[in-house]
Image: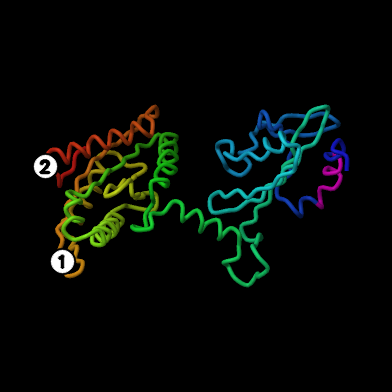
Amino acid sequence: MDNDITIDFIENNLNIFHKLYDVIRVVDPITKRVLLYNGNTLVEKASSCFNEIGKESICDNCISIRALKDKKTYMKIESLDNKSYLITVLPIEVNNKTLIVELIKETTDSLFYGHSLDGKGCKVNNIINDLKLMTIRDSLTDIGNRRFIDETLPIDMKVCFKKDEPISIIMVDVDYFKRVNDRFGHTTGDFVLKELAGCLKQCIRNKKDWIGRYGGEEFLVCIPGADEKAALVIAERMHERIAEKKFIHNNEDIKITASFGICSTSNKDITVEEFLNLADKKLYEAKNSGRNKIVF
């Protein structure tokens, strides 16, 4: 089929394509604008291509650009909000200009891997979710890892600022953790970190709050929508819970304390790095002034 009649073919056979795909569109891959083809005239719509599946920015792996450069058809699976989308793109020539036809299909429950369809495990969406979970979860403490923090914190900041709400973070660091490893061994140290993460998880308010392992024995607690007063209440709750907790491993009773640094902001101009640095400074104030305390 000649490329110059591809759009006409699609328009004349939409019923066939709509059974295969949820969205059919023509895209200018350079401007990332969606186009309409009416009466041999290309008309630009007022939406960006990536808005169609709920994204706020261009995909890191834009296969439309790749299809434009290579003059080839490409396919990829895009995962967003626990849903999977199969995206097929093919280049076409219209009015001496190369455009891209994008065909999008939600495949959350309809795309399978392998020949067996008798179990949930063979759904590609489940495989994607499992792989994603492996990349963002800390295997020891079963909370978010540094990658999870780096991906999630900027989004939560953006959402809060858009709603004109504050956001707070708490840096938590285990006091004298090296002494635990030196005296009891790294296996016991791992046990302490895992138990501590459990203590922190018990103190957050709801599903919007989250905890990540920032590195080593340091944790980050994110509380979207909370001002400094609300964050202080949660930090005090965590401080008390750790003080009451009995860390017993291999018949050893291990005393643990932690230091806390809190930072709250509503400043839309603050960067993620600046936000983290401010909380980190408060944490080091707590540690340098005697440890086992909260600074905000």
Does 11 appear in magenta?
Answer: yes
133 shown above or below 35: below
Q: Main structural element of the magenta stretch: helix, strand or loop?
A: helix
Q: In the image, what residue type sits under mark 1?
A: Glu
Instruction: Please provide percent x and percent y for residue 193.
Output: 27, 56
Quarter of the image that includes the C terminus: top left
* Residue occupying the point 64% across, 34% down: 48
Q: Is residue 79 left or right of residue 259?
A: right
Foreground label between 1 and 2: 1
Distance between mark 1 and mark 2 Cα atoms: 25 Å
Determine the residue positioned at 66% across, 40% down. Answer: 63
| Numbered badge on residue 290 | 2
Taking the image as shown, residue 14 lies to the left or right of residue 105, namely right
Q: Which residues are magenta?
A: 8-16
Give the labeled residue for mark 1: 252
In the rendered structure, the answer to whether residue 91 lies left or right of residue 81 reads: right
- Above or below residue 178? Residue 225 is above
Image location of residue 71, percent across then percent down:
76, 37
Q: Please indicate whether residue 158 sits to the left or right of residue 232 in the image.
A: right
Secondary structure state at the residue bearing disc 1: strand
Q: Amino acid at mark 2?
A: Gly
**First reached walking from the N terminus: tag 1 or tag 2:** 1
Q: Position of residue 214 (x, y in %)?
A: 33, 46
Q: Is residue 176 magenta?
A: no
Label 2 element class: loop
Number of residue marks = 2
